[in-house]
Image (cartoon, rainbow, N blue to C red):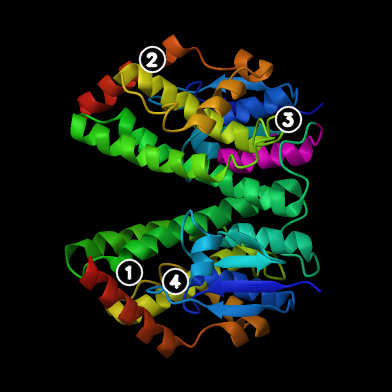
Amino acid sequence: MTEVKLHGFWYSPMTLRVVLTLKLKDIPYHNIEEDRFNKSLELLRYNPVYKRTPVFVHNGRPLCESMLIIEYIDEIWPHNSLVPADPYERALARFWAKYADDLFSAVVAFYLGNNGEEKEANIEKVWEHIMVVENKCFGDQKKFFGGDNINMVDLAFGPIVKTIFTIEDILEVKVLKDEKFPHFLSWYNNFKEVPIIKENLPEHEKMVACLKFIREKRLASS
Amino acid sequence: MTEVKLHGFWYSPFTLKVKWTLELKGIPYENIEEDRFNMSVQIFQYNPIYKRTPILVHDGKPLCESTIIVEYIDQIWPENPLFPIDSYERALARFWIKYADDMVSAIRLLALSSNSEEQVKAIEKIWEHLRVVEDRCFNDHEKKFFGGDTINIVDIAFGSMVKFITVLEDALEVKILEYEKFPHFHLWYNNFKNVPIIKENLPDQDKMLAFLKFSREKLLGSS
């Protein structure tokens, strides 16, 4: 029988990408909650290069990096496919998934930046990224990046947007403004209402408390 | 008939990755050399987001980002596959390609270092990366290349970066990929650069040195 384990942090958008993938495909797995301040030996053994989550372990073989994991899962369990079949569409999907990762770097800088002068510059960088998506991705009136159903690009962006909403409350600043990003936010509203997504998005207040705690701890130790 | 064009910089490891992929598969293409200080209008049209090369245009459809391009090429032209067939091996290959690409920021730092302190820092960063690969990727002593007996996409990804490192070694008169420190990696590169198609398509070292000197003057002089 196939054995699937996922080492992650419940509050991390990168882990959430993989959780949502597994849930959408109804793949049973053993969830191993890691402590970022006290990572398990297994995690460090499975991901000695980056020492971070998520780490996906399939029949004892580990894989790291959320989008790589998603593509692997989609190949092994191809039902409810999340990766476009057409090679060109697939390449475009991979491009936007990579862009989502670039957005995430800007979000992390914003999250860990001080609340002073850096804040404006950090928000600008996040806005720049989202504006690109707003302008480039919604030309054909699709409900999701995947068309009528969500695909890997929706999963690449969705958890990051969830995280931005969380950080808005922590830093008390509005980033995702309706007037700036109408299509992007309309897409996110549809995304979070997809039943399986809705059931598996972490609870907002819990995430705010957790990310606030982590931020304080990280800033104190730097 | 299928039309393939490649917009790139002859000296860029990312363009080189795509070129080697096309050459290894025997895919005819039109090479369009871009000038980084005066890029064509087409670059901005095909890659409005990053405004950079390489860009592959296949039957009029543009693709950006070298890693995405090479995987696309491997799917459309599956003969002489450069990506592993097995899903797990393929995921591992993608991981190492990304790791090779991540070396570019330290390489760029070194290329543009303006004092010895910056230089030392940049070299240490590159060494960190080389150390990981040295320790993690050469445990199977039967394998000559990452791809086994023949090169694959991981060889290409690391090869393009290491080529640039050797240029920096000559330009800055420093030793980076030292045999004593990285014996397996060093040996691997010697084998890699002697693969006929790679050897024929390796940018000329002196030409690259001259270009690096020119770039440093232009970029450091203007900052």
Picture quarter with the C terminus of chain B: top left
Chain at numbered mark 3: B
Q: Position of residue A180 (x, y in %)?
A: 41, 67
Viewer-side label of 2, 1: 2
Marks 2 and 1, how far apart at CA:
41 Å
CB contact under 8 Å: marks 4 and 2: no
Check the image and report above or below for B74 versus A128. above
Say which amino acid is labelled 3.
Answer: Asp
Which residue is located at x 69 percent, y 27 percent?
B22
Viewer-side label of 4, 2: 4
Q: Are marks 4 and 3 on the same chain?
A: no
Residue to which mark 2 is pinned: B209
Q: Nearer the viewer, residue A196 or A46?
A: A46
Identify the mark nearer the N-term, 4 or 1.
4
Residue to which mark 4 is pinned: A39
Marks 4 and 2, how far apart at CA:
45 Å
Q: Position of residue B135 (x, y in %)?
A: 51, 43
Q: Magenta stretch: give its range.
A: B60-79
Residue to which mark 1 is pinned: A111
| Magenta span includes A82 | no
Which of the 4 image quadrants contains residue A22?
bottom right
Q: Position of residue A7 (x, y in %)?
A: 56, 72
- Label 3 element class: loop
Chain at numbered mark 1: A
CB contact under 8 Å: marks 3 and 1: no
Q: Are marks 4 and 1 on the same chain?
A: yes
